[in-house]
Image: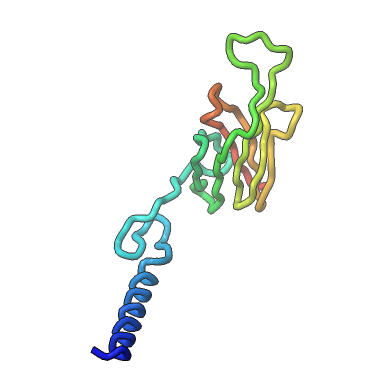
Amino acid sequence: MSAISKLLVAAGVLIALTACAKADVGGGTPGGSGPGGSPQPTVPVGPPLGTEFDLERGKSTVLSDSDVLVAFREVSQDSRCKPGQACVWEGDATLELTLAGSAVQVHTNKQFPVEAEAGGYKVSFVKLDVDGVVATLVVRKA
């Protein structure tokens, strides 16, 4: 086989491999199947607007009567008085959330903002469990 023939065969193989790799790239629809039939992760549907709901840290939900997504990303600081401790003040925890695509913060202590607005919606803090894993929230139209 001549050098030119080898070069043409190598170019053809490279083009074929590139086309196959591009066929696997891209996302499917949420909740549907992606390329090759693999299931894509879905976001659970939560309660309607104006209803209290629990959300675990690291999880998200879409409210059932709107397309607003709420995510509980993390507790960035937590100085709350733990059960069984004697404390001079009740403390505060800062919850890092995503509301309608925007990063927002709410606090557990009413001396700080316990509500935040984004994208025409308002999220209100209700409670946070002792371990800072489950937050109870309410989302309403702003």
Across and down, in percent, residue 107 comes to 68, 32
**Left or right of residue 70: residue 7:** left
> Percent position (x, y) of residue 67?
53, 53
Instruction: Depth check: give the residue in front, 136 or 132.
Output: 132
Where is residue 7? Give x, y as percent. 33, 86
Nearest to the observer: residue 66 or residue 71: 71
Residue 51 drawn at (x, y percent): 55, 37
Q: Is residue 45 left or right of residue 38?
A: right
Question: Which residue is outermost to the left?
Answer: 1
Q: Residue, x 64% and y 47% (percent of image)?
A: 103
In the picture shown, does residue 103 fall above or below 5? above
Q: Residue at x 50, y 44 (%)?
A: 60
Residue at 40% over, 62% down: 28
Toward the viewer: 77 or 102?
77
Determine the image quadrant of residue 89.
Answer: top right
Q: Is residue 66 left or right of residue 10?
A: right
Quadrant of res 44: top left
